[in-house]
Amino acid sequence: MKTVLIVEDDLMNAKVFSKILQKRGGLAVKHTENVDEVMQIAQGGEADIILMDVSLSRSVYQGKSVDGIKITQMLKSDPDTAQLPIILVTAHAMEGDRENFLKQSGADGYISKPVIDHQVFVDQVLALLPQDERAEGLEE
């Protein structure tokens, strides 16, 4: 089973995402906003994809305040974690933000909050999962 790491500082959002991904996507879910944990999970190969909240108001790494863009940059610049797909999640979606966030961070995709269409959300996550075992869960 594939594992999604949800990096999100709003527990309600994290719960909603977890439920959708588990129920509709058949995915395992981990959640943390602790950047050291995010790094450990990513470097340890314990997640197949990351949903990264852009704003992360409380996250600190090595004494500095970091947001989802910064964490994504760190993961993408590390050869050990560069291949891990990362989807940015943000509530602040202005026209043009999406491209800026993706370009700045090197992320693989982008989802706007609130998530209205659960199936589209799951499909976006599944589409970016590494392809090796994906086919097995898709037959109804």
Image (cartoon, grey):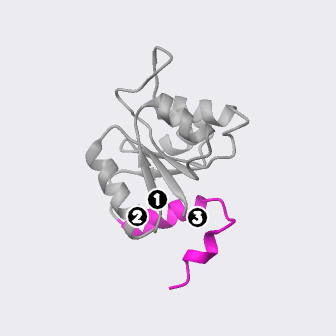
- Badge 2 crowding class, 10 Å Cα cut-off, few under 14, some 14 to 19, many 20 or more, is some
Which secondary structure class fits the magenta region best?
A: helix
Q: Is residue 126 magenta?
A: yes
Query: Of callouts 3 and 2, which one flags the residue occurring earlier in the amino acid sequence?
Result: 2
Of the two numbered discs 3 and 2 in the rendering, the one whose residue sits closer to the viewer: 2
The amino acid sitting under disc 3 is: Ala
Where's residue 115, x and y in %?
A: 35, 57
Alpha carbon distance from label 3 to label 2: 16 Å
The amino acid sitting under disc 2 is: Gln
Badge 1 marks a residue whose secondary structure is strand
Residue that protrudes farthest toward the right in the picture = 79
Query: Of callouts 3 and 1, which one flags the residue occurring earlier in the amino acid sequence?
Result: 1
Q: Is residue 69 above or below residue 27?
A: above
Alpha carbon distance from label 1 to label 2: 6 Å
In the image, the segment drawn in magenta is 117-140
- Asked whether, in this view, residue 102 is left or right of residue 35, the answer is right
Alpha carbon distance from label 3 to label 1: 16 Å
Per the rendering, the mark at residue 127 is 3
Per the rendering, the mark at residue 129 is none
Where's residue 55, x and y in %?
A: 39, 34
The residue that disc 2 covers is 22
Asked if labels 2 and 1 touch by Cβ distance under 8 angstroms, the answer is yes
